[in-house]
Amino acid sequence: MKTIVSKWKIWSVGVLAAVALTSVVSGTPNERIVVAATAVEKTAASSDLDASSSERALPDNGPAFWVVSSRSISWAQLQDPAHAISRLQFFRVDSQGRTTSAEESELHEEVGSADNLCIVVHGNRMSFSDALRFMWGFYRITSKVDGPMILWSWPSQSMVRGIARDSRLKATRSAQEAALLATWLNQLRPKGRVVLVGYSFGAKTLLRAFAESRQAIRDGSSQIPRGDGESWVQTAQRIELLLIAPAADVSELNEAIQVGKQVQTPFRIELTLNNLDPALKWYRHLWTCRGPNAIGWIFPCVTSDASSVLRIIDVTGEVGHTHQWQRYFQSRGVRAILENLQENIDSARLMQSQVNR
């Protein structure tokens, strides 16, 4: 009996320590804390994923990826995206795991000269250091892809007690983040190929951001602070959405598909399906007992003409009964998508070189 009680005490202390650690790192990051946390998180990610992955050759002092953080933006400030983007925070993360503050102009300069741009939006219940660890996992798989990689880090750390209440709160925030992301992309105005990768609620943000960008063009309210009035969906040469374990409604998917067909820019969507994912199974209970299913849990009912721009990859057998991003990233289905990402870049370069000849 004493042994059982002792073990229970040890387990309780461990849980409380984990909760305390999460609370410490969930706030706006201090730079020195971020540097240490990033190095630890990179090491942890190495054990989760294939350690034999080769790292991308970086220019001198070049970042492995950038971080654009909206964690300092309050809910009230988010109501005015055009002004809220001035409160975004920017960081550079190098291949050694060192994280430093950066100027937005540096990122603009790198994106302006790049043929490819990749923006990744993480899911719910991630502190800043958790988000960095998530991005390291993604980076190790896609290290051969050229062009800047950007992690869009939103305030997804635990805010209220109870997973249900917290998830409802984050579903609302992830939807509102879409307007902020669309406004910032309009300012960034990438001119090459744009790949948007969303995990869990991050997929909801990306689908809505794409749809809202097109709607802004139609309404003449694109909220572009500077430039000639063109939206990012008009300046990009190609747009691809990769949705991993997407926690989003089929209505959001169908709207994005219809928007994609109205935009002259080539466009496609790829998403994973896992009907054993417990988090996605619960998604329909966010607001009511009979809400819409998550498109990553059950085969979405899309429009009949969606087959030309939509590809669904069933990873149920490989991922199984979990919502962990590590398991999704390790699946052959997701890796095939990301490997195909590099092949598409190489094909586009070949076609362009033939045109130039």
Image (cartoon, grey):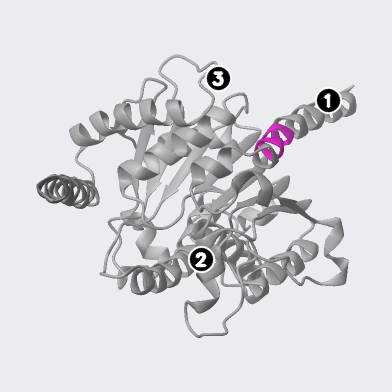
Q: What secondary structure is marked by label 2?
A: loop
Q: Is residue 274 left or right of residue 326?
A: right
Residue assigned mark 3: 56
Q: Position of residue 236 (x, y in %)?
A: 68, 47
For residue 102, above or below residue 18: above
| Residue 192 vertical position relative to residue 95 in the rendered view, above or below | below
Mark 1 or 3 closer to N-term? 3
SS at mark 3 in the image? loop
The answer to whether any part of residue 195 appears in the image is yes
Of badges 2 and 1, nearer the viewer stands 1
What is the spatial separation of the Cα atoms under label 2 and label 1, in whole angstroms? Answer: 36 Å
Residue 57: x and y in percent read: 54, 15
- Count the numbered circles shown: 3
Closest to the camera, between mark 1 and mark 3, is 3
Residue at 80% across / 63% down in the picture? 261
Name the amino acid type tagged 1.
Leu
Q: Earlier in the sequence, mark 3 or mark 2?
A: 3
Type of the residue with mark 2: Gln
Q: Which mark is residue 350?
A: 1
* Residue stretch in magenta: 335-341
Q: CA distance from mark 3 to mark 2?
A: 36 Å
Q: Residue at label 2? A: 223
Q: Nearer the viewer, residue 262 or 253?
A: 253
Q: From the viewer's perspective, is 268 left or right of 117?
A: right
The C terminus appears in which quarter of the rendering? top right
**Of 132 and 352, the residue lying toward us:** 132
Q: Secondary structure at mark 1?
A: helix
The nearer-to-camera label among 3 and 2 is 3
Image quadrant where residue 292 sits: bottom right
Q: Residues within 10 Å of mark 3 (few under 14, many from 20)?
A: some
